[in-house]
Amino acid sequence: MAFEGLADRLQNTIKKIKGKGKVTEQDVKEMTREVRLALLEADVNFKVVKDFIKKIKERAIGEEVMESLTPGQQVIKVVQEELTNLMGGDESKIAVADKSPTVIMMVGLQGAGKTTTTGKLANLLRKKYNRKPLLAAADVYRPAAIDQLETLGKQLDMPVYSEGTDANPVDIASKAVEHAKEEHLDYVLIDTAGRLHVDNELMDELIQIKQNVNPDEVFLVVDSMTGQDAVNVAESFNEQLDVSGVVLTKLDGDTRGGAALSIKAVTEKPIKFAGMGEKLDEIEVFHPERMASRILGMGDVLSLIEKAQENVDENKAKELEEKMRSASFTLDDFLEQMGQMKNMGPLDELVDMIPGANKMKGLKNVDFDEKQITHVEAIIQSMTSKERQDPSVINAGRRKRIARGSGRSVSEVNRLLKQFEEMKKMMKQMTNTQQGKKGKKGKKSKGFNFPFM
Amino acid sequence: MSFLKKLKDKFQATDQQEEVSDKYKEGLSKTRKSFSEKINDLVARYRKVDEDFFEDLEEVLIAADVGVTTVMELIEELEMEVKRQNIKDTNEVKQVISEKLVEIYQGNDDGSEETSLNIQKDDLTVILFVGVNGVGKTTTIGKLAHQLKSEGKDVLLTAGDTFRAGAIEQLSEWGKRAGVDVIKHSEGSDPAAVIYDGIQAAKSRNADVLLCDTAGRLQNKVNLMNELAKVKRVIEREVPNAPHEVLLVLDATTGQNALSQAKTFSQATDVSGIVLTKLDGTAKGGIVLAIRNELGTPVKLVGLGEKITDLQAFDPNAFVYGLFADLLEEE
Ligand SMILES: Nc1nc2c(ncn2[C@@H]2O[C@H](COP(=O)(O)OP(=O)(O)OP(=O)(O)O)[C@@H](O)[C@H]2O)c(=O)[nH]1
Ligand SMILES: Nc1nc2c(ncn2[C@@H]2O[C@H](COP(=O)(O)OP(=O)(O)OP(=O)(O)O)[C@@H](O)[C@H]2O)c(=O)[nH]1
Ligand SMILES: [Mg+2]
Ligand SMILES: [Mg+2]
């Protein structure tokens, strides 16, 4: 069936191997076949998949997998590593021009999310980098496109440069940059109309805008639900405009998002940001390792859930699911989860199954031994219930008090809080992808009960 | 007479149909070309029907977003058919491929019944548009309003997207272009309340058709899906047997997620038909095959551009004919 994760897919092969206790070349072949299907179901372009499988096969047939005790896990690990490599490192930086203003041009197909992302980036630039952006309304074609951008400008309380729908987009862009100079605004974000990559006339318009304003960034905005055509779109936009980066939108949905891999493979341009919702603060730095897990169906999360399910009672799991979805997961829940986790068996093994856990900031340095858990428990128990419900109130003074109360250091308290934030983010992503599985036959009870801590 | 000949004859029966298929061929020329080019490529490359042949055929279909599950089923059936008929030559297998694809598109009947919109003769017809963000709901409403109006219908629009910036203005602009009125509230108001007002206005003006826009929403957002179900309940309560159509708008560039969209939106709102937009791009639209195959939901309309006239009724025959025109003409 569609939308099975890789872990699901590998179940049968793994079972067979377990019986034999030895991995043959045939087994590896079967496993790479499953990897291929998983990637195709995730909408990775078939050509990209082909090249990728070749690489995986080489590594998998090597000793790494053949002699491993857990070949299934090992294959997933190899795949995920290669996938993460292919998708590149974190590159969320936005260019800064030597001479103000810095100009950013947004391009892409119709409905990809350009206008919304323009607003989000402007918001981010101000909030995180203390910049003063100008939004430029260069979409004169789509009905009410200018109204849309102006509304966003109003919501953000930011200036919007527009000349109505009779003006020429090339002129609008140039004049917006002039206007920014006069007003001492240091970023100009140009929203352009959606267009097909094969529409020569309109692509030409973008080329002209680019020549005129000489942008520091050209962001290609792509809908993460895009299918096999993503390669054509990305290749074509990149060839004609030499884009500087990609923004992947609508990742708050339950798509696997294989398009990310396709785009990266054909353009070799970094995916810089991920759109995670319709609101103007719902943009995140793109994380290649999370994306790799997502494309694979969250790596081993499913088996982790299975394992957890044997230990967690159904109602509690439901409750937790609800909490994760509404992002109201608190430190109290965290504490409770840890208790349950203690019943689950060796922690190292569990943590290893969390996709990307070894690469995640915050989790990386944590030694998951039982002692550590006791320390964490002590820290949380030293918090007031208000602090547990809403950790954002925990200021420096409170941190000191908690450290004293638990007999741990302030830096340990800090680390725990950071880790918790990181985990919440991860959960948000996971519940998004897991939700797509809801309603599938026989899988009802599975889902988001994910008490890994 | 061969199956494909029959199909071709069916098409050329009347001038009107000829026109339809031409428009399709034009809109789908990219689809058709790359698709049939690829099949022809295959045929030229392989003299023999063997494992390699099927492997590459599988790729061609996957590249068209048909979906792995559907493709695998299809290939299996083809392999069986080829064996049964003892086909050795790839030229012959071409025909079997065409027949199979047509079969999936059409289902059991000829499909003409279920692709036309359910428009009431004398009473008010209410059509609800649903779908994920940015697929083309609002644009399709504008196009359909224009089409229905030129058929002499009295059309009214209602701006049920009270969330997205500029959504109300966008629908208003389409209303202006189509020359029909738009019932609207201010941004941020309750969508169900706007739809309710739309219905009351349609009733008091004796309008023929009410087209209801809704905000785009991703199908995994439970609250938003509930909100949509509520909007539908309001329509059900206010107009007997309404909504007469719940149209799910799908973007042809969407990959496998379109299946999940179709499933979840159907659960929440009983989708009665699909509008497949942006087929004027290079996306192959093969997802229609998968959806037809797995869910049976009929495609009713096709979006072929951003102009008010770029909307066509989905005609499965024309669609398939468009895809395979080159192959047919070679016969
Ligand atoms: N859920 C979700 N919706 C998004 C995201 N980004 C954009 N959208 C929505 O997608 C739809 C299209 O977004 P726009 O910003 O209008 O897209 P655009 O590329 O400017 O569209 P055109 O100008 O028509 O080509 C809107 O409903 C947005 O609210 C995202 O990250 N998540
Ligand atoms: N090329 C092409 N573009 C289309 C087609 N249909 C819609 N569009 C474009 O797609 C973009 C999004 O269309 P909308 O009608 O705003 O989509 P929507 O589903 O109402 O979007 P939200 O309300 O934001 O969820 C616009 O730029 C439209 O012009 C089509 O058939 N072909
Ligand atoms: Mg826009
Ligand atoms: Mg809309």
Image: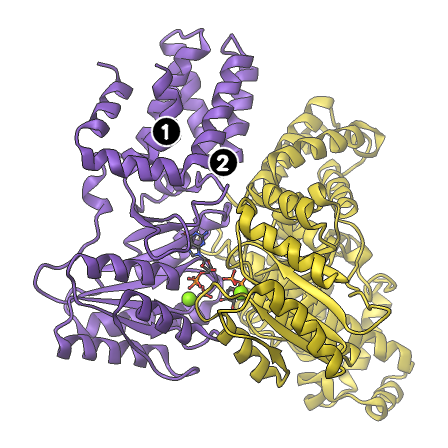
Chain colours: A yellow, B purple
Q: Is mark 1 within 8 Å of ligand 2?
A: no
User: Around disc 2, counting alpha carbons within 10 Å, would you say few (fewer than 14), some (14 to 19), or many (20 or more)?
Assistant: many
Which tag, 1 or 2, sits closer to the chain's start? 2
- Residue A3 as seen in the image, left or right of residue B325: right
Pinpoint residue A450: horizontal percent, then vertical percent: 63, 62
| In the rendered image, the vertical position of residue A352 relative to residue A150, given as above or below | above
| Residue behind mark 2 | B64
* CA–CA distance in space, label 1 to label 2: 13 Å
Pinpoint residue B198: horizontal percent, then vertical percent: 25, 76
Pinpoint residue A196: horizontal percent, then vertical percent: 53, 49
- Residue B50 as seen in the image, left or right of residue B20: right
| In the rendered image, the vertical position of residue A115 relative to residue A244, given as above or below | below
Q: Secondary structure at mark 2?
A: loop
Q: How many marks?
A: 2
- Mark 2: amino acid: Ala
Q: Camera-side residue: A65 or A258? A: A258
| In the rendered image, the vertical position of residue A328 relative to residue A39, given as above or below | below
Which chain contains the residue that carries disc 1? Answer: B
Which chain contains the residue that carries disc 2? Answer: B
At x 21%, y 48%, the residue is B116
At x 35%, y 41%, the residue is B292
Q: Secondary structure at mark 1?
A: helix
| Residue behind mark 1 | B101
Q: Camera-side residue: A423 or A85? A: A85
